[in-house]
Image (cartoon, grey):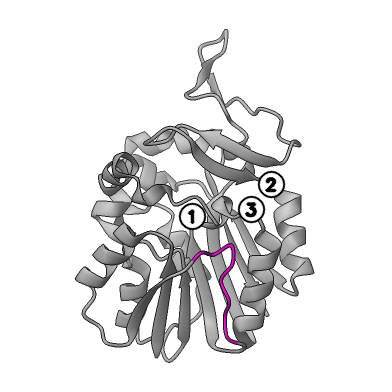
């Protein structure tokens, strides 16, 4: 079973204060880049893996999705998602993505935001998603970039010239990484970029696009704190098709 850190009171309280938790998709600076990677939503059957508070599910419903199924392991997340959702064709279910079973050909688009780096057996999950997509269905997901996850020490390291570098620790050593983010003992799974892409391909997918996300100049001008995200990619955005 996957770690259910989102139901730990300390972690959930901290996560609930993040801009993306308060403002939804508008609080996620990577959202404009993700939006460009998505197909037309109208009439699609959507699967939202690690749906969290339901921000994407509700957006998809507003864009004309035929149905949206959001899956999450956290009861805290699901409770808020259900409380804030009025659309009758949006459904939420509790599910462990490590073991989830999905019906064949039941969806046209699978989406996931910052959940896959928690999954130990990513190959199994991707095979299940491939099986659940209709022919020509698409998968669009985001996850922490392995360069970012390989940084096991907090903060920046100052160089002699005063500039900042990001410490990459044992990038090639894949497996579990335990970090202290919002709470102690948060478990994530580190994989190289090559391993993630090859796992996707071996699961049957055709890679459509990879974006090693960084903010635009306009975003940095509007939110100067995003300047730090130019030093190393924090996350990657991937689109693939069945």
Residue 114 marker: 1
Mark nearest the camera among 1 and 3 is 3
Query: On screen, 60 above or below 227?
Result: below
CB atoms of marks 1 and 3 within 8 Å: no
Pick whichever of labels 1 and 3 is earlier in the sequence: 1
Q: Which residues are magenta?
A: 96-103
Crowding at mark 2 (Cα within 10 Å: few <14, some 14-19, many 20+): many
For the residue pair 221 and 193, the one nearer the viewer reads as 193
Q: For mark 3, what is the residue?
A: 120
Spot occupied by residue 209 in the image (x, y as percentages of width and height) = 64, 65
In the rendered image, the quadrant that contains the N terminus is: bottom right
Q: Label 1: state its secondary structure.
A: loop
- The span from disc 2 to disc 1 (Cα, nearest Å) is 14 Å
- The span from disc 1 to disc 3 (Cα, nearest Å) is 14 Å
Query: On screen, 191 above or below 184?
Result: below
Spot occupied by residue 240 in the image (x, y as percentages of width and height) = 64, 71
Spot occupied by residue 90 in the image (x, y as percentages of width and height) = 33, 81
Q: Is residue 180 magenta?
A: no
Q: Residue furthest front?
A: 1
Name the residue: 24% across, 53% down.
Answer: 22
């Amino acid at each position: 079973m996957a770690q259910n850190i989102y139901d730990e009171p300390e972690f959930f309280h901290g996560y609930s204060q993040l801009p993306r938790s308060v403002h939804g998709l508008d609080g996620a600076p990577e959202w404009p880049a993700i939006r460009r990677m998505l197909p037309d939503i109208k009439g699609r059957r959507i699967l939202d893996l690690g749906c969290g508070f339901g921000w994407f599910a509700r957006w998809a419903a507003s864009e004309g999705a035929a149905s949206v199924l959001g899956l999450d392991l956290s009861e805290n997340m699901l409770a808020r998602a259900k409380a804030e959702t009025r659309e009758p064709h949006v459904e939420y279910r509790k599910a462990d993505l490590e073991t989830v079973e999905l019906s064949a050909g039941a969806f046209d688009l699978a989406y996931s935001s910052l959940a896959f780096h928690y999954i130990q057996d990513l190959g199994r999950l991707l095979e299940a998603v491939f099986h659940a997509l209709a022919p020509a269905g698409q998968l669009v997901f985001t996850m922490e970039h392995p360069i970012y996850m390989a940084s096991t020490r907090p903060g920046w390291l100052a160089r002699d010239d005063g500039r900042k570098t990001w410490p990459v620790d044992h990038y090639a050593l894949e497996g579990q990484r335990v970090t202290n983010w919002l709470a102690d003992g948060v478990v994530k799974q580190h994989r190289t970029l090559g391993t993630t892409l090859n796992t996707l391909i071996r699961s049957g997918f055709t890679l459509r696009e990879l974006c090693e996300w960084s903010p635009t100049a306009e975003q940095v001008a509007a939110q100067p704190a995003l300047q730090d995200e130019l030093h190393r990619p924090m996350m990657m955005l991937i689109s693939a098709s069945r």
